[in-house]
Image (tube, rainbow, N blue to C red):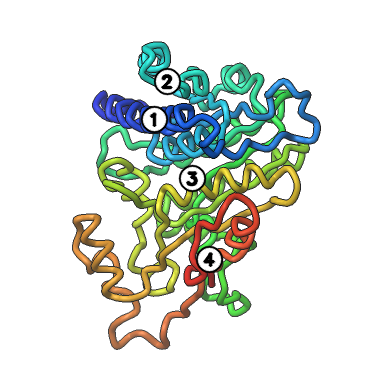
Amino acid sequence: MGIVRSEEWPRAEIEELRRMLLACAAVHRRKDEDGLGATPPRPAPRDDDDDGDGGGRAVCVTSGVSFLGRAVVNRLLLRGYSVRILVDNEEDVEKLREMETSGEMGSARSNFSAVVAKLGDVQSLCKAFEGCAGVFHTSAFADPAGLSGYTKAMAQIEVKASESVMEACARTPSVRRCVLTSSLLACVWRDTARNHLSNVIGPDCWSDETVCTNKKLWYALGKLKAEKIAWKIAEERGLKLATICPALVTGPQFISRNPTATIAYLKGASEMYSDGVLATVDVTRLADAHVCVFEAIINTASGRYICFDRVIGGEDDAARLAGEMGMPVDKICGGVGGGESSAQPRPRFELSNRKLSCLMSRTLRPCYDESSTI
């Protein structure tokens, strides 16, 4: 969202959201029909300063019809939240309103709504966020041409959007918490020539802007600078913020449903593979992580969280990912660090998602196997 795109993508996204909401409604209908025998959904927690009118359960999701946005909306609805989906044009709003008023949504119809706002317009965002206790800024952007993946100009737009969203959150009295979707790329692109670098990459690691710029890693640079400006505003304005840094987001048909971010993420894939930091995360697990962190902000959660469930650590893993992508395997694992001119092996690093794994194991529900915690 936030970038003008070809007509077929918004239509496909809305239709996919419709199918997801119908499935959500079916879950609620089954529980209603079961009556007392059904297990009610675990209620969303209320903030300590909630006035009791239910406002603590109203949240807004930016880019709510994107690949990740749809998954986050789905998990929030299943958790009993009232979800406001932010879209960038009236046509999408009308389509969502038709879905809401047609009756086909059943008991889920009152739990979601849509609102138009531009991600670079603070005033329209303030209106969109009004009455919501929390905001999920999933920051989904698309290349209008569908070719370059993510341009330098788009990185600047992403930074501006992050600044506007955070400023709107700070200005809106009802908003108490925000979860921002960053990227693992904001952590891993460091200057490996420095001797003091830890071999474990965790939430306290930040990519180097100079490295990203020199390598023309615009997606990494955009995510890095967008997250930094978000933290600056949150700290200055006293807003509760947590950021999630996911690996390459995968899931059903992810390359066709999320092409811009996927293509952009894999720029420099062979170097990440060689360094041991090329990883993926399933979109549903990532959505669960967003909800878990959001709920935990009330009491314990803070800072950054790295999110992945698979490290591409060998040729078989690389071949599997290449097959899912429909690309040559050497684009993922070939051509780095080889040749007689190499003076020494490239350093390899380990990713750590321990902070997020520990949080999820004691709150919402475990999303990761122990084998994925390093």
CA separation in Å, label 3 and label 1: 20 Å
| Residue 257 point in image, percent of width and height | 30, 40
> Residue at 56% across / 36% down in the picture?
40
> Above or below — where is 159 with respect to 208?
above
> Above or below — where is 29 with respect to 230?
above
Contact between marks 2 and 4 (CB within 8 A): the answer is no
CA separation in Å, label 4 and label 1: 47 Å
Mark 4 neighbour density, 10 Å: few (under 14) some (14–19) many (20 or more):
some
Contact between marks 3 and 1 (CB within 8 A): the answer is no
| Residue 241 point in image, percent of width and height | 67, 43
Task: State which mark lies toward you, 4 or 1.
Answer: 1
Mark 2 neighbour density, 10 Å: few (under 14) some (14–19) many (20 or more):
some
Task: Report which residue position mark 1 lands on.
Answer: 26
Quadrant housing the N terminus? top left
Contact between marks 2 and 1 (CB within 8 A): the answer is yes
The secondary structure type at the circle numbered 3 is helix
CA separation in Å, label 4 and label 3: 27 Å
The secondary structure type at the circle numbered 2 is helix
CA separation in Å, label 2 and label 4: 50 Å
Please, what is the three-letter code of the amino acid marked with disc 4?
Answer: Arg
Between 304 and 118, the one lying in front of the other is 304
Please, what is the three-letter code of the amino acid marked with disc 2?
Answer: Gly
CA separation in Å, label 2 and label 1: 8 Å
Contact between marks 4 and 1 (CB within 8 A): the answer is no
Between 324 and 349, the one lying in front of the other is 324
Task: Report which residue position mark 2 lands on.
Answer: 106
Number of labelled discs?
A: 4
> Residue at 75% across / 24% down in the picture?
52
Task: Report which residue position mark 4 lands on.
Answer: 190
Please, what is the three-letter code of the amino acid marked with disc 1?
Answer: Ala
Task: Report which residue position mark 3 lands on.
Answer: 287
Q: Is tag 4's residue or tag 1's residue first in the polypeptide sequence?
A: 1
